Amino acid sequence: DDDDDDDDDDTTSSSAEQLEQTIRSMKCGNYFAPSNIPNAGFSQYTAVPYHHKEMVINTMVPTLAIPVEHGIATNDPGNNVVSPSRKWILNEYVWTGKTYGMEYESTSQILALGPSLANFHPGMVNTGVRAPKLSPLLDLCHDPGAGASSDYRGCAFASQPNRRLRAGEELFVSYGDNWFASRKEFRTIPLSKNYDEANHMLQQLWELRDSSSSTNVLELMPYLTNEPLTRQVLPSTKEEWTRIMNEQDGNTASLGLRSLEWLEEHGKCMDHIYVNTSTIRQAGQGAFSRRNLTKGTTILSSPMIHIWNRSTMELNLTALETGGIDINPTMQLLNYQFSHPQSSLYLLPINQMTAINHHHN
């Protein structure tokens, strides 16, 4: 059995190397373009197919802990603590620490910006997120750069072993159904369980139907479930049902594919660079070119999260039990943002742009 596992590892490694060479030879392998979901902004698309194996799709940014459970200092009169429930734009981009193996860093919320580059469709989750690993590059006792950057590495989009990805397909990750259920404006949207029930129902009925009875079976479908959100995703015509079974692998949710020409025209390339250990000793991780780029090429574009009020980057130490230990109140998050000394606005990139280091030359 161990030998079989080793063979699987070798095969996966070989496939990953072949895939990387294919992507390097292309103009671009991963795009950021308008989502197929109306009013959902932009999302990620793959320009290469992935076949039923867990493969890294794109390098992600470092994963950061945000200790909001201890409060963040603000200049608001009479209020020097930001509670986790306070409306803060980063609340839309955080995940639970346990999800990413960082529960000892932050029991409530961590900032994993990369997954936010993909949208969530409960019926079309086709991509997973590989959790980061604690891998310190610097020694806290000897390196002055230790603590200035995240020690969590390797967080990445990954294809799923039981799900093929086609070139031109939009990437969807799961935020968890509660992301919709907890927001009043989205409570009429079918959840994962509704799509699963509908898909199972269609598959069972497809095996029973014949050309003469398919219309009658279709009329009975709404009566086979008591869940109105499941009824919402069932097909209403024989033609739609046939398309779902023959062209969509039995999945009631489908948004189609984008051509490479469309992606080049409407999207921005996201994989000209990848993240690895920096050649600058104290800088932690850095960004490296994946392919030869001609002069004038846009290396990377990124959405920016705007964060206001400089004091939000300072921990409220009065709310912490420090035990007399001298703690630097400035959050590590500050080192990943762009700002101007005379402005109270911070701009936080949400992709590999945060890995591009400064060098005086």
Image (spheres, grey):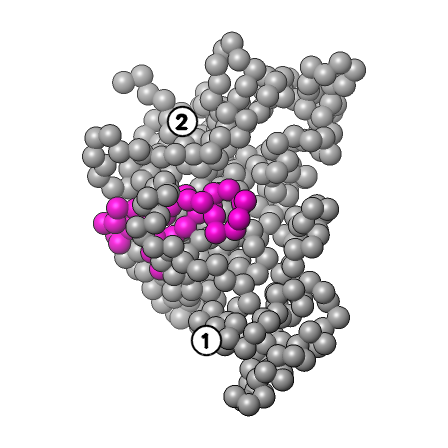
Q: CA distance from mark 1 to mark 2?
A: 52 Å
Which residue position is annotated with label 1? 246
Residue 110 drawn at (x, y percent): 60, 38
Point out the image quarter for the C terminus: top left
Relative to 333, 229 lies left or right: right
Q: Is residue 161 magenta?
A: no
Mark 1 neighbour density, 10 Å: few (under 14) some (14–19) many (20 or more): few
Q: Is residue 47 magenta?
A: yes
Q: Earlier in the sequence, mark 1 or mark 2?
A: 1
Relative to 293, 177 lies left or right: right
Point out the image quarter for the N terminus: bottom left
Mark 2 neighbour density, 10 Å: few (under 14) some (14–19) many (20 or more): many
Q: Quadrant of residue 294?
A: top left
Relative to 138, 82 lies left or right: right
Part of the protein shown in magenta:
21-49
Relative to 9, 119 lies left or right: right
Tell me which residue sits at (73%, 23%) in the image. Answer: 81
Report helix, strand or loop for mark 2: helix
For the residue pair 316 and 308, the one nearer the viewer reads as 308
Residue 306 drawn at (x, y percent): 54, 26
Dot in front, 1 or 2: 1
**Vertically, is 220 above or below 23?**
below
Amino acid type assigned to the residue bearing label 2 in the image: Ala
| Cβ atoms at labels 1 and 2 below 8 Å apart | no
Tell me which residue sits at (57%, 25%) in the image. Answer: 307
Task: Tell me, yes or no, if residue 131 can be seen here.
Answer: no
For the residue pair 102 and 218, the one nearer the viewer reads as 218
**Vertically, is 348 above or below 343?**
below
For the residue pair 103 and 198, the one nearer the viewer reads as 198
Which residue position is annotated with label 2? 283
Amino acid type assigned to the residue bearing label 1 in the image: Asn
